[in-house]
Amino acid sequence: MVLRESPVPKPKGNEVLIEVKAAGICGTDIHIKHDAYPYWPPVIMGHEFSGVIVELGKEVTGFKLGDRVVAEPHTLACGRCELCRAGNIQLCATKRSPGWGIDGAFARYLAMPVHLLHRIPDTVSFEEGAVVEPAANVVHDVLERGRVEPNDTVVILGPGPIGLIAVMAARAVGAGRVIVVGVSEDEERRLPMARELGAEATVVADRQDSIQAVMDLTENRGADLVVEASGSPRAIASTVGMVRRMGRIAAVGLPGRNDISFPWDAAAWKVCTVIFNLSTGYTSWDRAIGLIAAKRIDIGKIITHVEPLESWERTFEAVESKRALKALLIP
């Protein structure tokens, strides 16, 4: 990884040129740094961003110069396969998203297809806009697919940015109780932040029996929905013990390995539903933007580092060491 000069991209007929105002460092970017996620180098990294349209391709309609936008990272989806035609372009086999498949947002300028754009209102700052993408992931994975319902008990494993956004999202749609599970290194910043954002209780998994703690907090019933946002194999295995009979488990975190231990028989006896998730769907973006604009998801509270692009190395280190919650780079 290196900071270098690169040509300004020229937008194609159906693309716009965006001047990037802020770009977020995602866990995926950390995986790419360590060669633990597929990517096609040489490529400019970064897929969480906000910016302003500064040039329009000849075929672009519906957008104008100066529009404040964010964009779905689903470039090069074919538009013809079964998944694309069903509206699931995020799962297309030919998709190559900005930041790992094609040049991304850790740069001053980025070209994006117009059909992937979403406007953000003036009341949403560019810094907040750069966190719309992870918020849209939470809306898609936790609200739309995990189906948080009024008065649900929701347990969230992993108080990183996705887990903390999930606390706010679950509260926003009427969850009755939110419990967050972390580890001892989360006690200084992340678990207190979870409580500030609406978690009723927090559990420290390496200091107590996290399954028993959740059962005690739910009077031995278990959670309606367990959101696994840590990617920890131990946490993944614990989800079945925490969920109620016929409850739901939303798998969000990636362990970065093919084989992990999972209590299959226990899950079968509970008749629980395990929901795997990847990326975002179209509807989750405007829903996330609306929740952020209304401060139902107060996304600014998790932004702890805003640094110039030249400081990328120390900012990446802050994310890896968990000193940062959400870190942004400003090109």
Image: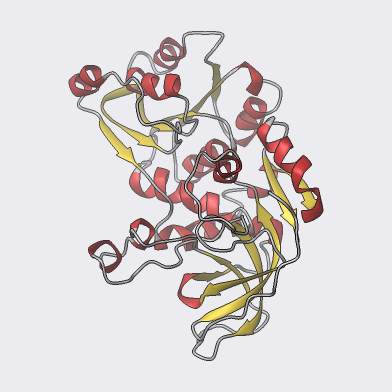
Q: Position of residue 219 (x, y in %)?
A: 37, 14
Q: Position of residue 238 (x, y in %)?
A: 39, 19
Q: Is residue 174 above or below residue 79?
A: above
Image quarter of residue 250: top left
Q: Nearer the viewer, residue 320 or 70?
A: 320
Q: Is residue 125 above or below residue 321?
A: below
Side (left or right) of 276 relative to 212: left
Query: Residue drawn at (72%, 36%), measured in percent from left and top?
Result: 317
Query: In the orientation shown, which residue stands out farthest toward the bottom?
Result: 58
Q: Position of residue 322 (x, y in %)?
A: 68, 31
Image quarter of residue 272: top left
Q: Is residue 281 above or below residue 297?
A: below
Query: Residue drawn at (34%, 26%), measured in percent from left and top?
Result: 259
Q: Nearer the viewer, residue 234 or 170?
A: 234
Query: Residue drawn at (44%, 36%), measured in percent from left and top?
Result: 254
Q: Position of residue 134 (x, y in %)?
A: 54, 49
Q: Is residue 59 above or below residue 7?
A: below
